Amino acid sequence: MNAHTENGETFVAVFLFPEELRDSFSLRLPVRGLAPPAAIRAAATFAGAAAVDVFRLIDGSSWPASAAYLYAETVPGTVVDDSMVEQVATPDD
């Protein structure tokens, strides 16, 4: 299995929230590299406006089967190409 290709391989991204402010959830996403994405941005709304929930990688030890992400912040904006989830290779992207 070649984890760096986009040939239908997927991983389970587990999204966690600090202090259980919201329910944790998971999504199956395409594998897009040899390592898990450093961050995932998910479409959200804040006070009725378009926003993005930013999740930072906290555990990639089960890659490429799964990776865990912790909620970091909600920022104004949208994800690329109007998709619901955007994988970010480096945290500064």
Image: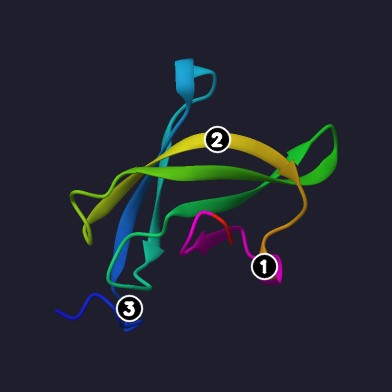
- Is disc 3 placed on a helix, strand or loop? loop
Q: Estimate the x, y position of residue 81 in percent, counting from the top left.
A: 69, 72
Q: Which mark is residue 80?
A: 1
Q: Estimate the x, y position of residue 49 in percent, counting from the top left.
A: 85, 42
Q: Amino acid at mark 3?
A: Gly
Q: Which numbered disc, 3 or 2, marks the residue that appears first in the sequence?
A: 3
Is 54 part of what is drawn in magenta?
no
- Which of the colour schemes (rainbow, by chain, secondary structure, one colour) is used? rainbow
Is 90 part of what is drawn in magenta?
yes
Which region shows up in magenta? 81-91
Is residue 5 shown above or below 14? below
For disc 2, the marked residue is 72
Residue in the picture at 85% in, 37% down: 48
Is residue 83 shown above or below 3? above
Query: In 3D space, how far apart are the residues under numbered discs 3 and 2 (Cα atoms)?
Result: 29 Å
Q: Which numbered disc, 1 or 3, marks the residue that appears first in the sequence?
A: 3
Quadrant placement of the C terminus: bottom right
Quadrant placement of the N terminus: bottom left
Residue in the picture at 32% in, 53% down: 12
Total number of numbered discs in the rendering: 3
- Is disc 1 placed on a helix, strand or loop? helix
Query: In 3D space, how far apart are the residues under numbered discs 1 and 2 (Cα atoms)?
Result: 19 Å
Residue occupying the far top of the picture: 19
Of discs 1 and 3, which sits in the foreground? 1
The residue carrying pointer 3 sits among few (fewer than 14), some (14 to 19) or many (20 or more) residues within 10 Å by Cα, namely few
